Amino acid sequence: QVQLLESGGGLVQTGGSLRLSCTASGRTLSGVRMGWFRQAPGKEREFVAGISGYAGSTYYADSVKGRFTISRDNAKNTVYLQMTSLKPEDTAVYYCAAEGKRFTVYSDYAGYDYWGQGTQVFVSS
């Protein structure tokens, strides 16, 4: 069993930056595919970014490509999401997730078995 804890959310102005962290306990994240998702009020959860187990590959939603960067430090059991050039439409609760047995593609939330509690990001206009 793995527990995930996100941090780093907050209030930022349009054009600002935030770095989210997702730290795991209970097991190592080394070799585990990870993803970041977000959910805005009244909207479905959507894929933001994914990273392979040893950080060899990264994947992004078109809406964040070029602005967000996912990375990981397996020694610290932590995955990061660096967000720059933030827009009001990035406002959401951001969740990190660890792959499960049904994992197929990074963008499919059904493939992740472990989720954090979420961290709120609010971008003011």
Image: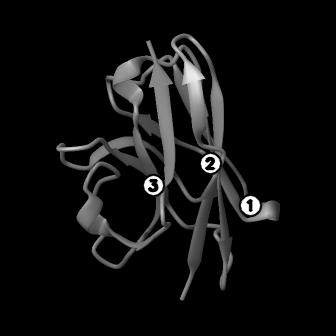
* Nearer-the-camera pick, 114 or 50: 114
Residue at the (60%, 45%) spot, across then down: 56
> Which residue, given by chain and number where applicable, does mark 3 sit on?
95
Disc 1 to disc 3, C-alpha distance: 18 Å
Disc 2 to disc 3, C-alpha distance: 19 Å
First along the sequence among labels 1 and 2: 2
Residue at the (58%, 20%) spot, across then down: 84
First along the sequence among labels 2 and 3: 2
Closer to viewer: mark 1 or mark 3: 3
Q: Which mark is residue 46?
A: none
> Which residue, given by chain and number where applicable, does mark 1 sit on?
74
**Image position of 117 with respect to 2: above or below:** above
Q: Position of residue 36 (x, y in %)?
A: 45, 49
- The local secondary structure at tag 3 comes to strand
> Which residue, given by chain and number where applicable, does mark 2 sit on?
55
Type of amino acid at the residue the image marks with label 1? Asn
Residue at the (25%, 43%) spot, across then down: 41
Disc 1 to disc 2, C-alpha distance: 9 Å
